[in-house]
Image (spheres, rainbow, N blue to C red):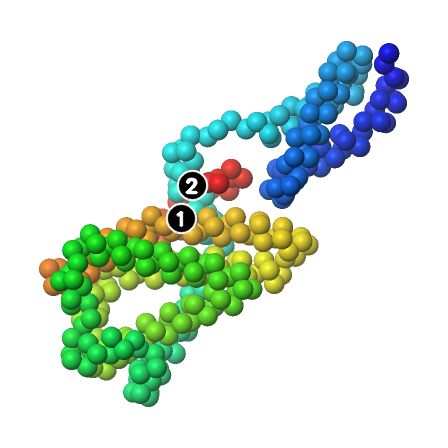
Amino acid sequence: MAVPLPAFVGQRRPDWEALQGLLGRQRAGTLRLEELRTLDTLYRRAAADLAHAQTFYPGTDAHRFLNQLCGQAYAAIYQPPRERWLAVRDFFRREFPATLRAEGRFVAVSAAFFILGLLLGALVVLLEPRGAELLVPEGVRAYVAQGRMWTDDILSVAPPNAVSSGIATNNLTVIIFTFASGILFGLGTVFTLLNNGVQIGAIAALCTREGLGLPLLDFISAHGPVELSIITIAGGAGLMIGQALIDPGDLPRGQALTLRGKAAVKLVLGCAPFLAAIAVVEGFISPGSLFPTALKAVLGLALGGLFWGYLLRAGKGSALSSTSLR
């Protein structure tokens, strides 16, 4: 025999309110992994309560409330699968560029650290010639001492496709490390950006001082603008991780890291195909003298302009979706 409706509601209300709370957190993206089992359990209890209400309390507010609550829970738990290619298309059409624009301040700070490293490395070598012994790899210094570019022998060692593959692997390693080292409260990312900037600036200064500035420009002009842009974007993602650890705001540090980490990972994932594409340019076009320097420079500027044009304009006017690549 059914208990009176007020008694039924009073007895079961705590579970319903707990389920409502978990659904709210699921929509906000703050639901923890260990809470999924609780969500499923509470949904099953609410479904049983709905069946009970349909039998003994049809048409009541409790019946209508449970019907709505179970519908929301079912939609949250049993989401229809999205076609993967549509998700990927939506990610690159809208989510990746929109995320970068929303987090642009971190990318700007990352670029500032990288440029600071470039200036420091260049100044050290220009003001103190022996600084090159500390900042420039020995192999590079040996080539420069002979008046040659170390890039001259790239295609004689391996074919362009192998060079591109090796470059892509190396660049991806740098990007992942730049991003992942943000877990050290951002200090790892800052060090990586400064270190890469210092080394590149020192090499550029050494080549310029030894009369190899134009050959260096010939090599880096085609791929440099996009490749260096991707490094600063990865640095911005790492700084986002560091900021979440240092200043989580009103959220627990773990929750803040989860939320900011999702946006940071979007930046790194979004850069991956562009990194692979620019490795092809670096392997096939940048080395050697098949293409003139002017053409390489025009190509590099065009690719850089297209890349940033896409990032700054694609998906404008569309809100960021909570459903993304996962």
Give left or right: position of 4 versus 227. right
For image coordinates 46% across by 58% down, the residue present is: 179
Image point (49%, 52%), residue name: 264
Q: Is residue 67 above or below residue 110?
A: above
- Foreground residue, 287 or 103? 287
For the residues marked 1 and 2, what is the alpha-carbon distance in whole angstroms? Answer: 8 Å
Q: Which residue does the image show at 80% across and 29% down from the upper left?
A: 13
- Which circle's residue, 1 or 2, is located before the other in the chain? 2
Q: Which of the numbered marks, if any, corresponds to residue 91?
A: 2
Which residue occupies 66% across, 30% down? 40
Counting from the top left corner in percent of width and height, residue 58 is at 77, 12
Image quadrant in which you'd find residue 297: bottom left
Q: Is residue 235 placed above or below 72 in the rendered structure?
A: below
Q: Helix or strand or loop: what does disc 1 sit on?
A: helix
Q: In this rendered view, identify the residue nearer to me: 50 or 35.
A: 35
- Quarter of the image with the N terminus in it: top right
Which residue type does callout 2 highlight? Phe
- Tell me whether the residue at label 1 lies in contact with that at label 2, contact meaning CB atoms closer than 8 angstroms: yes
